[in-house]
Image (tube, grey):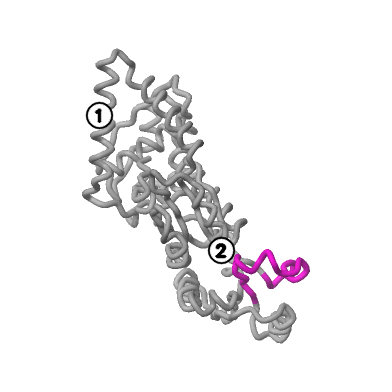
Amino acid sequence: MSIRFYFEPYSQIPPHVQIIDRIRLALLTGQLRPGDTLPSIRDVEAELGVSRNIVRRAYIELETYGILKLRHGKGVIVHSELSYPTDLPLVRRSQRLCQEALTQALAAGLVGTSYARMLYQVALEQERSTQRFYFVDSTEPLAKERADQISRVWQITIVGLAMHQMNMLEEVSQETPLKIFTSYYRYGEVSGLAGHLNADVIPIGLKFTEEMYEEINRLSDGATVEIILDEHDFASYGGLILANYQRAFASKKVTFKVKALTTTNDLKKRLKSGECQVLVISNKLWDDLPSDFKRMKMVTRAKMEFDGRASEQSRLRAGIVV
């Protein structure tokens, strides 16, 4: 199935963002499905009368988010692993509300696109005055890093909080439920901490960065990688974390082990003895370790980022349509 693109040349919304939003909306309404082929960059350029670079930028951004796949000689394809529900009440409600609002605006003599821009500004002001979206993780720097990644992809403002800062949310107006995002690892803990809040806790997917893949792929076959966690995470999530590494790097012939943090001197001894070739330190521990230890060539941190493709269901669950 294919789609037609629409473009407002005088809009303040950048042209490539208009293309991105059109594709997201087509996925949401079922006009596009996983595996469908989109018009080529050249065809969209001709249809909209915009430069090829604008279309390419939109497609590349959606590829970065894991929504599209650009294959040389085979065109642009909606990622086959993208998961969208076939019957989503949110879609029907959104379409009905949009149509009702547009009908009333036109009856009042307003221009539809102009009214939409006004509605956007009013909504933006309201969201700025009452923050509803948060990402929670083990440390504040990590939570802010993740929140920034998601904000850029979903084009909304998400605030990062450490788990110990969640008591701050008690002071936030909860007439409308808060949306609290967290990783699948932290979902149970964060749900427990949010139990007394009017909040929906939503897990999102994370994936290893390209840099992390490069670091592991540089290792010789037979190398041992130790993943260092604190005592709590080792006891609670050690098996899950180990399985995640083994699955992600299954094509590489290295051995992964999960260990609880002891002392940096002990870790240095294990490296020196050849017991392991690389130490991957959890992000929860990283900031508190000595700088000279973190600068060691065989020491790295767990590098993960927001997985847009795996989190499309989470986006829709939060009511974020496009």
**At which x and y percent is residue 142?**
59, 58
What's drawn in magenta, residue-wise?
Answer: 278-299
Q: Residues within 10 Å of mark 1 (few under 14, many from 20)?
A: few
**At which x and y percent is residue 267?**
69, 80
Extreme residue toward the top, this view: 109
* Residue 1 in view (yes/no): no
Quadrant in the picture for residue 300: bottom right
Name the disc covering residue 138, or none.
Answer: 2
Disc 2, SS: loop
Q: Residues within 10 Å of mark 2 (few under 14, many from 20)?
A: many
Q: Nearer the viewer, residue 54 or 66?
A: 66
- Rendered view: 267 above or below 191: below
In the displayed structure, does residue 37 sit left or right of residue 197? left
Q: Which residue is mark 1?
A: 99
Q: Residue at x 61, y 72 (%)?
A: 280
- Rendered view: 213 above or below 156: below
Q: CA distance from mark 2 to mark 1?
A: 42 Å
- Three-letter code, disc 1: Gln
Name the disc covering residue 291, or none.
Answer: none
Q: Residue at x 72, y 68 (%)?
A: 294
* Residue 302 in view (yes/no): yes
Q: Residue at x 53, y 50 (%)?
A: 147
- Three-letter code, disc 2: Ser
Q: Earlier in the sequence, mark 2 or mark 1?
A: 1
- Rendered view: 18 above or below 183: above
Disc 1, SS: helix
